[in-house]
Image (cartoon, rainbow, N blue to C red):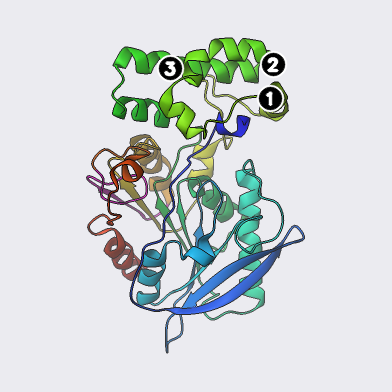
Amino acid sequence: MMKFLFISTFILLISVTCNAQINKEVFEFEFEGVTLNGVLNTPQEREPKGIILIVHGSGKTNAVEDEWYYDVREQFVKSGYAVYMWDKIGCGKSGGTFDYNQSVQNSADEVIAAINKIKKMNKPGSDKIGLWGISRAGWINPLVINKYRDIEFWISVSGVDGKENFKYLLKQNLRIEGLSEDSVKFLVSEWQKGVHITHTGGSFEEYVSATKNLEGNSFYKRFINNRKLTKKGYYAYQKEFMKSELDPETGLPIYIQNFDQLLSRINVPVLALFGERDMNVDWRKTLTLYKKTLGENTDLTIKTFPNCNHNLFKSNTGGFYEFEDNEMSWIRCDGFLESMNDWLSEIE
C-alpha cells in the first residue's frame, strides 16, 4: 500500500492504432538473471541510421503485446531508425516479479544491459544508440548517459526534476476536481506531514491521525485504488523510506542526489518536449532546470505544446482521469511526432 503514497510519476500508457506496418523482431536480453522480452522494429529495405531505445515511465507494462507507443516507433522507423522496446521485469512475457519500487539506478542498469546485448549481437544501427523516454525515464536516461558514455542523443518527453512530483500532481488534480484553494492547501499539507512522519520514524497511529482527511478524499482514494493502509504495510515501507533523503527546502523525497550536476555533465544533443497542461509533473520547473544545466554543455532544443497533457495528447484540463471520465479520443498534439523527425534530421 505504501508504494502508492510517495509515488513518482504514474502515467496512463495507451497504444495508438495505426494502419501502417513496420518490421518486427522479438529480441530478448538478460538482466540480473531474468529474461526480458522486447521487440525490435526496423525500417524496410534500408540500413538503420541508429537504434532508439524506448524507456518507460512508472508502473507495470504490457508494451510488447499491446503495441505501446506504436505511433512514436513508427515515426522513428520512417525517420530511418530502428527502435527497441521491452517489458519490465514481471510484465508482459518478461520473467521475474515486478517491483514497483525498483530504483531509477537499477532501471538505468537495465537499459545498459539492453544496449550491451544489442551491441553484442551487432544489430544494424547499433553503432549509434539514442534514448527516448517519458516521465520517470527523465531520471533513468541521464543516469544511463553518464554511466555508459556511448549514447548519441536523448529525447526527453515530460521530463522530471530531481525530486518527488506527487505533491504537484495532487495539488493540480484537486483543483481540477473543483476543491477550493483552502481545501487543496489543507490536503496537500496533510500529505506533506505524512511524508515527514514516515521519514522521521513516526508511528502508524501518528501517520493515520495526520492524514485522515487526505485518506478520505475521493481523488486520493481513487488514485490509490481504494487500498486501505495497514500497519504492516506502513512499517515495511517506512523501513526503506527512511533510507532516502528529503530536500531540506521543500521536504520532498530526492530521487537522485545532485541531479543538476548529473544533467550538467551531459554533452549529447537533447530534445525536450513538454505538454503545457501537464498536471502530473511540474514541467515549468523541469524546463527551467534543463535550461540551467543541459544548456551549458550540449545542444538543447525545447518545445512545448499548448492544450496537451503529460502524455502529449490533446487535453482540456490535463487531469489524471480526464480521458477515462469523459471518454475522450486519444489525439496526439499537433507537431509532436513531426518535431522528433525534424530534430533527428538536424542532428545527423
SS at badge 2:
loop
Give the labeled residue for mark 2.
201
Q: Nearer the viewer, residue 50 or 224?
A: 224
Which kind of residue does numbered mark 2 sit on?
A: Gly
On screen, residue 48 above or below 5: below
Which one is in front in this view, the residue at disc 1 or the one at disc 3?
Answer: 3
Alpha-carbon distance for marks 1 and 3? 21 Å
Q: Nearer the viewer, residue 325 or 50?
A: 325
Q: Nearer the viewer, residue 141 or 199?
A: 199
Give the labeled residue for mark 1.
238
Give the labeled residue for mark 3.
187
Specify the segment rendered in magenta.
298-315
Task: State which tag comes first along the sequence, 1 or 3.
Answer: 3
Alpha-carbon distance for marks 2 and 3? 21 Å
In percent of width and height, residue 28 lies at 65, 70
SS at badge 3:
helix
SS at badge 1:
helix
Check whether the beta carbons of the residues at disc 2 and disc 1 lie within 8 A of each other. yes
Q: Is residue 145 visible?
A: yes
Task: State which tag comes first along the sequence, 2 or 1.
Answer: 2
Which kind of residue does numbered mark 1 sit on?
A: Gln
Q: Quadrant of the N terminus?
A: top right
Quick check: 234 left or right of 312? right
Q: Is residue 249 visible?
A: no
